[in-house]
Image (spheres, helix red, strand yellow):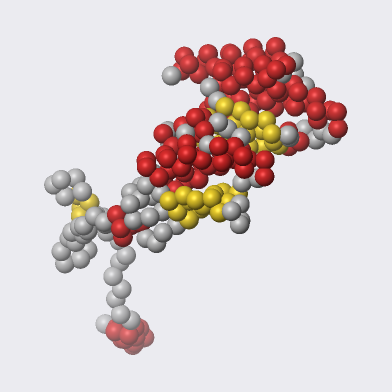
């Protein structure tokens, strides 16, 4: 039987090609094995690495350098600030362990942390407390910002809701306030908030949900809704919220 010389040459060339190429391992997804306690174990390395344990950081190292916040005081709030300074000064220094002063040159209330300050969030609370008083809230109402964590301040302009001018703007502010402040007091009592009307600015103090209800009512009054309709709407919303909780 005759042998084909071409077949032998082809077989030799295949052997040469096989020697010239290196064999590559197949890339299969390596699954992580689960340990007896249910935690994932990494079996790729020589031994499973343990989670590092670090000691808790001391309060001095966590606090870092002293921080200071400034709250600008407008001219018409100088006298109320002077009269109520002791009520403002006492909770900030005794309860929050902060330092506070009124800078006569820059007309700012400066609040600063010190070595006795324990909570980092105290500086923000004190700043919100002073800011609320400067905006026109009573000291007793602003003190709630120090005692409760879920209280916030929100401010907006009447002209942000509707661009009004002249007598139209005055009538819109009058609708929000009501005769003798009746409408404002009603909204405050139903929504459990505190509202300050300062010219064209509206400041609301309360929880997130209550601020939303009060803001909706005030915006409807600015847009021209009669107070009786607004009263009905906020009472319905307030009753639903009370049932939910």
Q: Does residue 213 sit above or below 227 in this rendering? A: below
> Farthest left residue?
36
Q: Residue at x 80, y 28 (%)?
A: 170
Percent position (x, y) of residue 239? 53, 13
Residue 51 appears in the picture as rendered: no
Which of these two is toward me, 227 or 39?
Answer: 227
Q: Residue at x 48, y 16 (%)?
A: 242
Q: How many marks can you see?
A: 0
Percent position (x, y) of residue 75? 67, 45
Quarter of the figure that contains the N terminus: bottom left
Percent position (x, y) of residue 219? 70, 27
Residue 137 appears in the picture as rendered: yes
Which corner quadrant of the image does residue 165 belong to?
top right
Q: Residue at x 53, y 36 (%)?
A: 84
Percent position (x, y) of residue 145? 47, 35
Q: Residue at x 51, y 40 (%)?
A: 85
Q: Relative to 132, is 3 on the left or the right?
A: left
Which of these two is toward me, 140 or 148?
Answer: 140
């Amino acid at each position: 039987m005759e042998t084909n010389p071409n077949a032998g040459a082809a077989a030799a060339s295949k052997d040469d090609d096989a020697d010239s190429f290196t064999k590559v391992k197949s890339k299969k997804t390596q699954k992580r094995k689960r340990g007896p306690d249910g935690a994932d174990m990494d079996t790729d390395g020589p031994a499973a690495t343990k989670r590092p344990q670090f000691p808790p950081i001391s309060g001095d190292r966590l606090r870092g350098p002293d921080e200071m916040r400034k709250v600008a005081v407008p001219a018409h709030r100088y006298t109320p600030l002077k009269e109520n300074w002791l009520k403002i000064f006492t909770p900030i220094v005794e309860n929050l362990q902060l330092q506070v002063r009124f800078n006569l040159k820059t007309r700012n209330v400066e609040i600063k942390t010190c070595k006795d300050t324990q909570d980092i969030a105290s500086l923000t609370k004190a700043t919100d407390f002073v800011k609320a008083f400067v905006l026109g809230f009573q000291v007793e109402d602003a003190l709630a910002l120090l005692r409760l964590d879920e209280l916030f301040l929100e401010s907006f302009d009447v002209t942000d809701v509707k661009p009004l001018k002249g007598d139209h703007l005055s009538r819109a502010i009058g609708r929000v306030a009501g005769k003798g402040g009746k409408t404002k007091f009603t909204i405050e009592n139903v929504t459990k908030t505190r509202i300050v009307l300062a010219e064209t600015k509206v400041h609301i103090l309360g929880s997130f949900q209550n601020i939303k209800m009060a803001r909706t009512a005030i915006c409807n009054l600015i847009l021209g809704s009669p107070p009786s309709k607004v009263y009905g709407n906020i009472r319905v919303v307030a009753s639903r919220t009370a049932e939910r909780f």
